[in-house]
């Protein structure tokens, strides 16, 4: 049986942000609007005034107090260090200003692909080995290949088409997982009342009686946002994000 090690795979794909290896790309490439999450308007491609010469943030310790709570919730899924170190070879946009425009265009595309990789690893961790598993592994490989494309060959068109395929597959996998969770939920009262079966074990006595998905509660405070990414920007800031709502939550 194929066992998927989500932690190891996410480490291999470098999906955790490593700001030390980045050139402050999220603080430059994205546009922000003054709101509860960000204190002022900032156009895309212009450095945030708080970005320092070493790509640190001047208000890092007091982001929330100063009106930048969105910055604390944001993640690039490792796109920053990938673009900075792999795609552009560790030469930053201040050292090589002629690369700046392409670098700032590339970053959100790679972020989109890395976000897709994150969701694929989530799906692989949750679905049973079988047809969906194989399809997800294929999608993962193709997404990884696209994310490694040369910057001057990368385009939103290709990525949009690919993400549409990914979205369809993830929706299919998600529906299967939800259906399985619902059927376990329906069986639970019978399992509890069966003699010799204690709460928290399956009727067969060989594992948890409910999928982890079922533990997601319906209560949600504040604006809807993905439970996994915790990214508050995905719904309103980045219109291109297809994964604004997590597909793996049942509520
Ligand atoms: S406030 Fe700090 S973390 Fe937020 S965009 Fe500006 S420099 Fe980056």
Image (tube, rainbow, N blue to C red):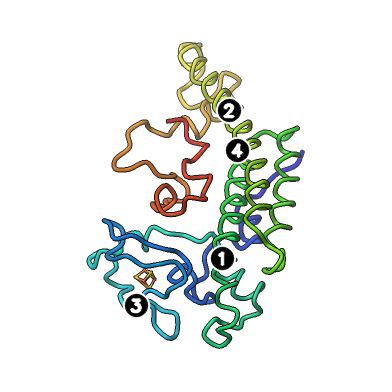
| Secondary structure beneath label 1 | helix
Q: Which residue is mark 2?
A: 175
Earlier residue among tags 3 and 4: 3
Pair 1/2: label in front: 1
Disc 1 to disc 4, how far (Cα)? 29 Å
**Residue that label 4 marks:** 126
| Comes first in the chain, label 1 or label 3 | 3
> How many neighbours does mark 3 have within 10 angstroms: few (below 14), some (14-19), or many (20 or more)?
few
Instruction: Establish whether ligand 1 lies closer than 8 Å to the Cβ of label 2.
Output: no
Residue found 28% across the figure and 57% down from its top: 35
* Left or right, residue 63 beside residue 177: left
Mark 1 crowdedness (10 Å alpha carbons): few <14, some 14-19, many ≥20: many
Q: Are marks 1 and 4 in contact (CB under 8 Å)?
A: no
Proximity of marks 3 and 4: CB atoms separated by less than 8 Å: no
Q: Position of residue 206 (x, y in %)?
A: 61, 27
Mark 3 highlights which residue? Answer: 49
Mark toward the start of the polypeptide (2 vs 3): 3
N-terminal of the two: label 1 or label 4?
1
Residue 167 vs 54, above or below: the answer is above
Which is closer to the viewer, label 1 or label 4? 1
Report helix, strand or loop for mark 4.
helix
**In this orientation, which residue lies closer to the viewer: 40 or 249?**
40
Is the CB of mark 3 within 8 Å of ligand 1?
yes
Query: Is residue 225 left or right of 152 when viewed as pictured?
Result: left
The residue carrying mark 1 is 107
Ligand 1 neighbours mark 4 (CB distance < 8 Å): no
Measure the C-alpha gap from mark 1 to mark 3. Answer: 19 Å
**Earlier-in-chain disc, 2 versus 4:** 4
**Which numbered disc, 3 or 4, marks the residue closer to the eye?**
3
Decide: few, some or many residues near mark 4? Use Cα within 10 Å; few <14, some 14-19, many ≥20. Answer: some
């Amino acid at each position: 049986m194929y066992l998927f090690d989500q932690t190891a795979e996410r480490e291999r794909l470098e999906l955790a942000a490593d700001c030390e290896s980045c050139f402050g790309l999220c603080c430059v490439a994205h546009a922000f609007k003054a709101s509860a999450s960000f204190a002022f308007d900032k156009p895309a491609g212009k450095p945030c005034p708080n970005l320092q010469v070493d790509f640190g943030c001047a208000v890092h310790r007091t982001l929330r107090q100063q009106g930048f709570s969105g910055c604390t919730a944001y993640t690039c899924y490792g796109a920053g260090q990938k673009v900075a170190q792999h795609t552009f070879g560790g030469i930053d946009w201040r050292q090589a200003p002629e690369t700046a425009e392409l670098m700032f265009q590339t970053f959100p595309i790679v972020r989109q692909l890395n976000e897709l990789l994150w969701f694929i690893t989530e799906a692989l961790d949750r679905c049973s080995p079988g047809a969906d598993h194989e399809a997800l592994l294929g999608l993962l490989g193709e997404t990884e290949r696209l994310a490694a494309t040369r910057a001057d060959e990368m385009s939103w068109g290709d990525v949009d088409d690919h993400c549409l395929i990914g979205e369809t597959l993830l929706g299919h996998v998600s529906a299967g997982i939800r259906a399985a969770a619902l059927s376990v939920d329906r069986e639970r009262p019978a399992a509890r009342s069966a003699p010799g079966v204690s709460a928290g074990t399956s009727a067969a006595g060989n594992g948890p009686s409910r999928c982890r998905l079922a533990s997601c509660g319906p209560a949600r405070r504040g604006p809807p946002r993905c439970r996994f990414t915790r990214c508050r920007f995905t719904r309103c800031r980045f219109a291109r994000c297809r994964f604004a709502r997590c597909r793996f939550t049942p509520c």
